[in-house]
Image (cartoon, helix red, strand yellow):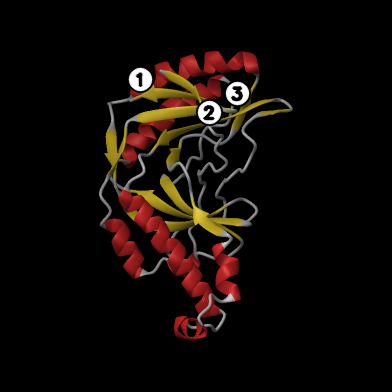
């Protein structure tokens, strides 16, 4: 197991979903919790997830989604790309949207909600987590993506483009079951019972910014993405990261 210092993550994609009307994803109960992953009253904030190796394909899809969101926002405001080009400038709508849309750093698949432990509980939790994960793990594996969905945080103030996992979903579910057992031993909530496992690649500040950007062409691009390798589970408490090789 490795233990090292890292820059704290601030986005933890996990979801308890209800289907959206446009058939492109799930949004109402997405539990993004942008917290300071340091010490808070009542304990240290923690999160368990599968690290996803960032690929050129993921970066390309992220940028394509961002470009599409910005372009569609211009179009919705009645500003065509031709008109903008003729003026030789970026529209104010486009500039405003681009400042609120960005790529998600450190792609990952959440296995827990954000939770809190006291300092003296952390070592015992990590030890138990390692044993449970190694007992359930069948080694490193690849995940493939079935489609893109729109997710939102609980307040609806932030949206995400999430790539839903198709191939490899049962392996992720098996690990969630192992992690849930440890969470219960420490009196913490298990993961969402009807979660759809996914990797968030783009986040947008604001409501209804992403919904129209995931057209058929984008979905086909996502289906064509090569599978990505997962060989490590990680657990963060504050700026401390514990790694468990699968």
- Pick whichever of labels 1 and 3 is earlier in the sequence: 1
Q: How many marks?
A: 3
- Relative to 210, is 207 on the left or the right? right
**Which residue is painted at 50% across and 44% down in the image?**
13
Query: Is disc 2 placed on a helix, strand or loop?
Result: strand
Where does residue 157 sit, x and y in percent of width and height?
63, 57
Where does residue 93 sit, x and y in percent of width and height?
59, 74
> Which sits in the foreground, 241 or 134?
241
Q: Which residue is mark 1?
A: 134
> Which sits in the foreground, 21 or 8?
8
Where does residue 49 sit, x and y in percent of width and height?
45, 34
Q: Are marks 1 and 2 in contact (CB under 8 Å)?
A: no
Where does residue 149 sit, x and y in percent of width and height?
43, 57
Say above or below: 211 vs 14.
below
- Which mark, by number, is residue 236? 2
Q: Are marks 2 and 3 in contact (CB under 8 Å)?
A: no
Q: Which residue is mark 3?
A: 187
């Amino acid at each position: 197991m490795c233990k090292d210092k890292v820059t704290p993550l601030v986005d933890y994609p996990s979801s308890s979903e209800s289907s959206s009307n446009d058939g492109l994803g799930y949004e109402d109960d997405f539990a993004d919790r942008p917290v300071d992953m340091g010490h808070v009253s009542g304990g240290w904030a923690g999160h368990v997830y599968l690290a996803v190796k960032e690929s050129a394909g993921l970066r390309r899809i992220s940028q394509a989604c961002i470009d599409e969101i910005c372009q569609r926002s211009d179009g919705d405001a009645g500003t065509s790309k031709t008109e903008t080009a003729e003026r030789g400038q970026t529209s104010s709508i486009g500039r405003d949207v681009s400042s609120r849309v960005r790529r998600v750093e450190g792609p990952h698949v959440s296995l827990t909600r954000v939770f809190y432990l006291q300092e003296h509980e952390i070592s015992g939790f990590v030890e138990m987590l390692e044993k449970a994960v190694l007992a359930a793990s069948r080694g490193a594996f690849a995940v493939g993506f079935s489609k893109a969905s729109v997710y939102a945080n609980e307040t609806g103030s932030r949206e995400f483009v999430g790539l839903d996992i198709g191939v490899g979903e049962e392996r992720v579910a098996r690990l969630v079951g192992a992690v849930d057992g440890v969470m219960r031993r420490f009196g913490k909530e298990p993961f969402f019972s009807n979660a759809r496992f996914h990797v968030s690649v783009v986040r947008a500040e604001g409501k209804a910014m992403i919904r129209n950007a995931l057209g058929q062409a984008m979905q086909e691009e996502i289906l064509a993405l090569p599978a990505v390798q997962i060989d490590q589970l990680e657990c963060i408490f504050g700026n401390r990261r514990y790694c468990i090789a699968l």
